[in-house]
Image (cartoon, grey):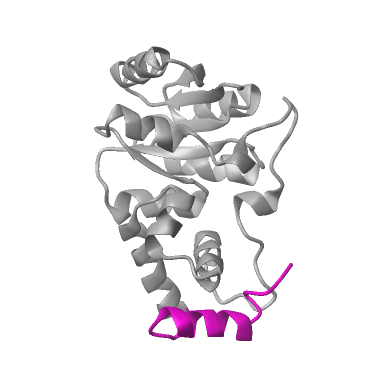
Amino acid sequence: MTDITLLIVDDHPVVRDGLRGMFAAEASGFHVLGEAPDGVRGVELALELDPDVVLMDLRMPGGGGVDAIAELTRRGARSRVLVLTTYDTDTDTLPAIEAGATGYLLKDAPRGSCSRRCAPPPRAVRSSPCRRLPPGDRRPHPGPADTGLSARENEILALVARGTANRAIAAELFISEATVKTHLTHIYAKLGVNDRAAAVAAGYDRGILGRN
């Protein structure tokens, strides 16, 4: 089985060393390709090394994480980004997720949790060194009747339409269940509805759902 490759972006050397050591201690399955002390260098290395997963701190002098994530998304990077954060709060994580992050990882998370979060779903594992995910696999395409839903909100609405429960949505998108609920609240407000069923109905009516 091919190792999952990682890039660590954090301005604290002790954090980078600790993460590198943790993944090196794993029996198998992970390989750290490199480290970066800020978002600017992180973008450069992510594009150069093409890791499966980028572990991205948010608050760094010389280049913050949200801007780096947005730049990687803009440039079509294959890598999935997990935010490294100390606090499980929407204020910290939502801007990063809106910018294109897959989810987040608490810095005090248990080792097993870190390993599970860093293992991309099957569609994210490359089959050859040059394979890149199609843009639609990273974030949904905006619909013809754009209601102002973000890419992540479109993705969650599509999962809701398939009958996926909040907990399962959280697991699939590598985010917390609380974050899913926050996204749903925003979706309801933007669509002018009060529950999941009405949101799905509005999604079909407005052409957000049901597209190829």
Residue shown at the point (41%, 35%) measured from the top left: 116
Looking at the rendered image, the quarter that the N terminus falls into is top right
Residue 31, x across and y down, in percent: 51, 17
Classify residue 183 as left or right of residue 50: left
The answer to if 182 sits in the magenta stretch is: no
Residue shown at the point (46%, 21%) measured from the top left: 36
On the question of residue 210 being in view, the answer is yes
Is residue 169 placed above or below 62 in the rendered structure?
Answer: below
Classify residue 52 as left or right of residue 196: right
Residue shown at the point (50%, 50%) measured from the top left: 99
Residue shown at the point (66%, 41%) measured from the top left: 75
Towards the viewer: 158 or 122: 122
Residue 90, x across and y down, in percent: 31, 55
Residue 38, x across and y down, in percent: 43, 27
Towards the viewer: 180 or 148: 180
Q: Dividing the picture into quarters, in which one does residue 165 lie?
A: bottom left
The answer to if 211 sits in the magenta stretch is: yes
Is residue 191 placed above or below 25 in the rendered structure?
Answer: below
Residue 65, x across and y down, in percent: 43, 38
Towards the viewer: 192 or 25: 25
Report the magenta residues as a range.
191-212
